[in-house]
Amino acid sequence: MGRFNSKGMWNIPHVKKNEKKAKLKLTDDDDELLVVEECYCPNGHNLVSPNVEFTGRHGILIKLKKGKLEGHIALSPYCGDKSKYTIGIDLSEGEIMNLLCPTCDVPLPVYAPCDCGGDMITLFADKMGNYCNCIGICNRVGCSHAEIKQGSELFNIYHRKGEIRGTQGYL
């Protein structure tokens, strides 16, 4: 395939995605919910854990650190659901926590600053660490964005503001 077609337009190859990392599930009332089935740290460790469950689905397990205090937080795998519980640490409204991979302790990367003064933290939907295929959550306890947000929603919010920090996977 050449770089340009007969009309002088760029030929852009179609890239086929091998796996779908999140799927749509229809509930009884026909509302669509996005369920996160896999998400990864920058080193490729799966953060969805069989050790935590929310309504029959495996939850997202993340290590928390604040000063010398450490613990874990289990997040609902349903995008937009604020359900969570902590293990080994107590959280107070307004605290900003450091979010880490529970396997390798690497800090989860920042997608963009949040309106509340915290940061939107990136959870990758593929092992490649692609910012175009990610979900995010604010690291401030009690923030209105302290829930799983879809990558397209993150991009639409923060691209308009010009505040996206994680740009390695965009172009």
Image (cartoon, rainbow, N blue to C red):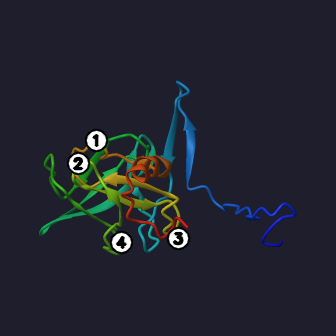
Q: Earlier in the sequence, mark 1 or mark 3?
A: 3
- Rounded to the nearest angstrom, the CA distance separating label 2 from label 1 is 8 Å
For residue 39, above or below residue 160: below
- Rounded to the nearest angstrom, the CA distance separating label 2 from label 4 is 29 Å
- Rounded to the nearest angstrom, the CA distance separating label 1 from label 4 is 28 Å
Tell me the number on the disc at residue 156.
none
Element class at badge 2: loop
User: What type is the residue that disc 4 sits on?
Assistant: Thr
- Rounded to the nearest angstrom, the CA distance separating label 3 from label 4 is 17 Å
Disc tally is 4
Residue in the foreground of this view, choosing between 118 and 58: 118
Residue in the foreground of this view, choosing between 46 and 141: 141
Residue at position x 34%, y 68% in the image: 101
Q: Position of residue 59 (x, y in %)?
A: 40, 51
Element class at badge 1: loop
- Residue that badge 4 annotates: 103
- Residue that badge 3 annotates: 128
- Residue that badge 1 annotates: 144
Q: Earlier in the sequence, mark 3 or mark 4?
A: 4
The quadrant of the image that shows the N terminus is bottom right
Contact check, label 2 and label 1, Cβ < 8 Å: yes
Residue in the foreground of this view, choosing between 147 and 8: 8
User: What type is the residue that disc 2 sits on?
Assistant: Cys
For residue 32, above or below residue 122: above
